[in-house]
Amino acid sequence: MNIFINGEIKSYDQNNLTVFDLIVDAGIENKKYAIECNGHIIPKSKIKETYVKDGDKFEIVGAVGGG
């Protein structure tokens, strides 16, 4: 399966891949982030039950602290 994450193509062999799996793969599961799929924000309450489809386009943005 090929998907786009922040404008780059990533390939996954795994079927039944969830959005949470993408977050874990990015190493930000314990950080603040927002994720959009095909132009729609995915609520954090739905990331473990939202499955990735071939060709999906994701934007993942992590929060940065500072002052």
Image: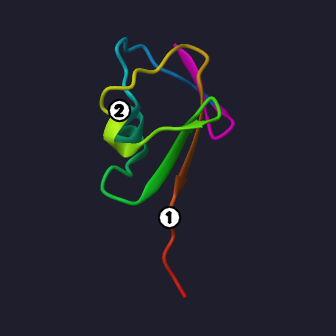
* Residue on which the image places disc 1: 63
**Residue in view at x 47 percent, y 38 percent:** 42
| Span shown in magenta | 1-8
Tell me where residue 17 appears, x and y as whole percent.
37, 21
Task: Measure the alpha-carbon separation of dots 2 and 1.
Answer: 19 Å
Q: Is residue 6 magenta?
A: yes
Magenta stretch: helix, strand or loop mostly: strand
Q: Is residue 49 magenta?
A: no
Q: Amino acid at mark 2?
A: Asp
Q: Nearer the viewer, residue 34 or 40?
A: 40
Instruction: Farthest residue to the bottom: give it.
Output: 67
Tell me where residue 4 appears, x and y as whole percent.
62, 29
Q: Quarter-wise, where is residue 67 in the image?
A: bottom right
Q: Amino acid at mark 1?
A: Ala
* Residue on which the image places disc 2: 21
Total marks in image: 2
Tell me where residue 49 appears, x and y as whole percent.
31, 26
Q: Are marks 2 and 1 in contact (CB under 8 Å)?
A: no
**Residue in view at x 50 percent, y 15 percent:** 53
Mark found first going from the N terminus, 2 or 1: 2
Q: Quarter-wise, where is residue 57 in the image?
A: top right
Mark 2, secondary structure of its residue: helix
